[in-house]
Amino acid sequence: MIGWLEGEVIKIKLESGYLILNVNSVGYIIHTTAHTLLSAKRGDTLSVHTYTVVRETALDLYGFNSPEEKALFELLISVSGVGPKSALSILSLADTSTIYNAISRDETSYLTKVSGIGKKLAGKIVLELKDKIGDIGESGNSTTTDDASVMEALEAMGYKAQEARDAIKSIPSDTQGLNARVSAALKALSNQ
């Protein structure tokens, strides 16, 4: 099992959700979050915590920026019906504390923003993980509800879901209130 890799990014495949990392002249395909893919550049040195999925026909590596992100991934795939690709999509929504908050506050609507996660599966994720995560996410800001509303507002204005998610991630953490968060997201979108 491979637990961590560091190497040079030699290829980024946004549409396929992976990058290739050159580690001592071996190219590893690492499936990772949209945020990692968008922030990585060819030639950069990248360190990732990895999770290995072994199947009958494949051996896949999933990479994460932090041990916390990897731990949340492992929790998500422990839920029946949530595969590694869906778990990565959930992790691409926001930072780990925001996702923990959404789960601990029963905010299934936040999880349904991911393609392939319906109300039933989102409810199952919340039900199965709420007790496991305990108060992990309670220490962060409670902006999850606002972020879901910001996402809806941006999509209503015609922005794509991924553009809206990226804009929400760039909102300063001290920005409070729905109107202020929408304004900050629109500012981020206009700067792109």
Image: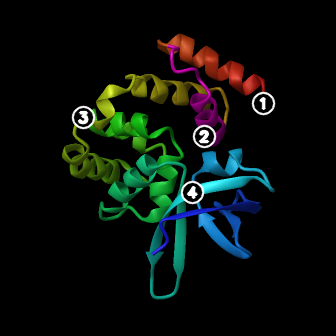
**Label whose residue precedes the other's in the sequence (3 or 2):** 3
Dot 2: element: helix
* Crowd band around label 3 with a 10 angstrom C-alpha radius: few (<14), some (14–19), many (20+): few
User: Is residue 11 at least partly visible in the picture?
Assistant: no
| Residue 140 within the magenta-colored segment of the rendering | no
Instruction: Say above or below: 96 vs 121.
Output: above
Q: Are marks 2 and 4 in contact (CB under 8 Å)?
A: no
Q: Residue furthest right?
A: 43
Dot 4: element: strand
Q: Residue 48 — which label?
A: 4
The amino acid marked with disc number 2 is Ala
Label 1 or label 4, whichever lies nearer to me, is 4
Q: CA distance from mark 3 to mark 4?
A: 26 Å
Bounds of the magenta segment: 161-175
Q: How many marks?
A: 4
Dot 1: element: loop
Q: Position of residue 34 (x, y in %)?
A: 62, 49
The amino acid marked with disc number 1 is Gln
Give the image quarter of residue 100.
Answer: top left
Q: Quadrant of the C terminus?
A: top right
Q: Quadrant of the N terminus?
A: bottom left
Q: Nearer the viewer, residue 154 or 25?
A: 25
Q: Position of residue 150 (x, y in %)?
A: 53, 24
Dot 3: element: loop
Q: CA distance from mark 1 to mark 4?
A: 27 Å
Q: CA distance from mark 2 to mark 4?
A: 26 Å
Can you identify the residue that label 1 sits on? 192
* Crowd band around label 4 with a 10 angstrom C-alpha radius: few (<14), some (14–19), many (20+): many
**Label whose residue precedes the other's in the sequence (1 or 4):** 4
Label 1 or label 2, whichever lies nearer to me, is 1
Q: Are marks 1 and 2 in contact (CB under 8 Å)?
A: no
